[in-house]
Amino acid sequence: MAVSVDLSKALDKGFEDKSLKEILDASPSALAGITDEKAAALKDLLGIKTIRELGSNKYFAVAGVLVALEGKQG
């Protein structure tokens, strides 16, 4: 089963036609809204050099779960 996802608003123009592997191996600055300076800060402060590392970072994962749980309270 083929899956299609439109990431044009989430990525810089230069990455819209790249493969998933190329996107995951790219600097976080390939994400729309993350500048080279912000990507450098992620590298300096947290050692994050790629989108893959950003997405699999344990601190960001825990934060995402906590936000999702907040929406389930009730």
Image (cartoon, grey):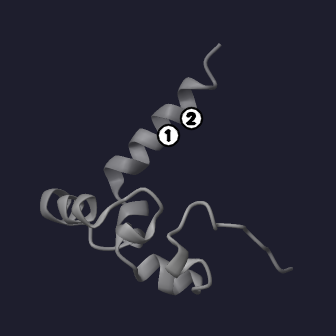
User: Tag on residue 68?
Assistant: 2
| Residue that lies at the very extreme toward the top in this rendered image | 74
Classify residue 25 as left or right of residue 46.
right
Nearest the eye: 69 or 32: 32
Residue sitting at the far right: 1
Whether residue 54 is visible, yes or no, is: yes
Where, by quadrant of the figure, is residue 25 drawn? bottom left
Residue at the image point whose x is 46% and y is 65% from the top: 31
Q: CA distance from mark 2 to mark 1?
A: 5 Å
Q: Nearer the viewer, residue 7 or 74?
A: 7
Q: Residues within 10 Å of mark 1 (few under 14, many from 20)?
A: few
* Residue in view at x 73 percent, y 68 percent: 5
Callout 1 amino acid: Val
Which secondary structure lies at badge 2?
helix
Query: At 49% from the left edge and 86% from the top edge, which residue is drawn?
Result: 22
How many labels, in total? 2
Horizontal relation, residue 31 to residue 34: left or right: right
Evaluate whether residue 56 shows in this view: no
Q: Are the residues at dot 2 and dot 1 in contact (C-beta closer than 8 Å)?
A: yes
Q: Residue at x 56, y 61 (%)?
A: 10
Q: Position of residue 38 (x, y in %)?
A: 26, 58
Up the image or down, 59 lies above or below 29; here it is above
Q: Which residue, as the protein is rendered here, is positioned at the far left?
A: 44
Residue 6 image-quadrant placement: bottom right
Q: Quadrant of residue 2?
A: bottom right
Q: Which residue is mark 1?
A: 65
Q: Which label belongs to residue 48?
A: none
Nearest to the observer: residue 3 or residue 17: 17
Residue furthest front as drawn = 13
Dot 1: element: helix
Place of residue 28 in the rendered image (x, y in percent of width and height, measured from the top left): 37, 67
